[in-house]
Image (cartoon, helix red, strand yellow):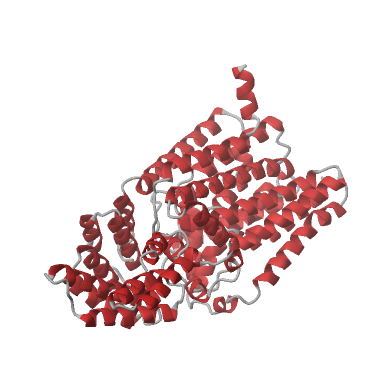
Amino acid sequence: MASSFSQRILQHPAPVLGLLAALVSGIAFSGAGLFGDDTAFLLRYIPSLENWSETWNLPPSFRDWFGALHRPLSIASWRLDHLLFGENWAGYHWHQALWFGALVFGFTALTFELLNALGPNLGGRRTLRGTWVIGSLFAVHPAHVETAAWIATRHDVLFGAFLCFSLLATAKSLRAVDPSKAMKWALIAGLTGFLSTQAKETGFVFLPLAALLCTQVAFRGDLPNRHRAWVSLWPSLLAAFLGLLLRGSSGAEEFLSFHPDAFVRWLSATGWAFDFSLLPLEPRLFHPTPPLGSGWLALSLGCVWFAVGWKRRKHDGLSLFGLAFGLLCLAPTWMVAFQPLMETLVADRYLLLPIGGILLALGRPLSMPGNRVRAVVFLVGALWLSFSVRYAWTWAGPPQALGLHVARHAPSSVEARIGGIARALRAGNLKAAKKIRDLEPTPVPFHSRDFRFRMMDFLIAYHEKDWELAKLTSQQLAEADPNNPSRWHELGNIQWQMFLDLSSKNPKGLAPKNLLLDAESSLERAVKIDGRHFRSWLVLGHVRASLGRSIDAREAFSRVLHYGGSTAEAMEAKEMLTRF
């Protein structure tokens, strides 16, 4: 009985590995909380969406912050989380874990199909062994800790899962004997490919990869006729065209200006991707700019691998497909190399699928029998797993651990410091926040954003209730970044807190009225820039109530209810409205 059950499990590597990946990620990271862009997405913009259509057509303030990116499926998934879980972040992390499990399932199932379609007649047992090995190594790679633990990487797991599902369906369409089943799988491939493009721009690579797969299978003569390749591909062509059409001109022109050192940056990033995929010694959120030497090595090895794969294309199409899969899915790194859109040139999450490409390219040797191969696979898997467990602890352990980890591994990054300080302060650990701020060397601001230095002092001063310093730094931040409503909100909130503090210290409960007027002016400027800034509306409501303007206060609290969704601010506004 037990033997029969274990045999059934061994016959289904994709669901087993996918389920394990989802369970382990959910259990490990359900308490990981928020970091970095999580706060912008989940605490500010997602709650202010009024309906589902706005996940496609973002409000102006959200669009200004999000830039030219068009990812409605990812935005919709966060809105679903907000409606289901409110500010219970464990629910968001479990949702993230489910999609990570779906990605592992999709990639492992795709591996099985590719070993059958492109592998050099491996046979049933060897194909199954190769699927287990490649799927397991993919699941435990340290670079995947970030996408399993960080809610802000929802785009990556969604696009990756649907990309794998699309290629999986394409492979099944090519192998189907019944034409009606082939068409059904081809339509599923087009649908999931389209969903991949709506999760992240990199999803558009599903089309060239599907075209390559159809061409390779047709070239080997494994189809009932060459027409089957076209039947399997046309829904994907239509889906890609639809994705481009719906995207329209959503700011793509911003990507047309290239960095003067684009080639050097791309080459160093490609070398880092190759090095880190094979030997991921230090997974982290912020990586330093990688050296150029490894880039030339990666480029040389890639050319050699292409030559070998092209020569063996009739007998072993997996090498060529794996190389193309890895290179095309590395597109985010290429984009950042061409134009410095963000502080980091490379990131762990950019390797989510390129790692799979390397493993697929090595599919034939990884599926070979013998104790030597098993020993090497076990050693590599154990090494990767140990790195993953160590990095996972920085996410799943004490909140300040991740902040310290990020600051120590990216000492020159201002944004890393700010993210680490904010995470430590959310956990109430002022000592860790100061330690992160004072680490040597002094960080270097990104793209002339010197004012971001002051944010570190502002966060700590606010937590310490050093209102004078907090007011000074918030004024400097607002003057340096006047079109950012959050800066005016911070200034207005400080002025309101100063009023409350002085009122509590005065026996008669009085404080200078000019503080209220200054706070109202700052907060009105914030909501003028972003009418959905519900945090500003909440403080503005309190300020107007203190000024005795109950009708205006009620209007402000009503705005919080309208734009605040299921946030704590909305609950507070609801309570305040019952008092009027």
Q: Is residue 553 above or below residue 117?
A: below
Asked whether residue 442 appears in the rendered view, the answer is: no
Q: Residue at x 61, y 37 (%)?
A: 15
Percent position (x, y) of residue 544? 33, 77
Q: Is residue 418 above or below residue 224?
A: below
Q: Is residue 440 above or below residue 541?
A: above
Q: Residue at x 32, y 64 (%)?
A: 418
The residue nearer to you, when weighing 151 against 122, is 151
Q: Is residue 6 above or below residue 106?
A: above
Q: Is residue 343 left or right of residue 20?
A: left
Percent position (x, y) of residue 202? 60, 62
Q: Residue at x 61, y 35 (%)?
A: 13
The residue nearer to you, when weighing 80 against 200, is 80
Percent position (x, y) of residue 541? 36, 73
Of the 4 image quadrants, the one containing the C terminus is bottom left
Q: Residue at x 53, y 37 (%)?
A: 20
Percent position (x, y) of residue 73? 60, 60
Q: Quadrant of residue 472?
A: bottom left
Q: Quadrant of residue 122?
A: top right
Q: Is residue 348 left or right of residue 187?
A: left
Q: Residue furthest top?
A: 1
Q: Residue furthest left?
A: 507
How many marks the image carries: the answer is: 0
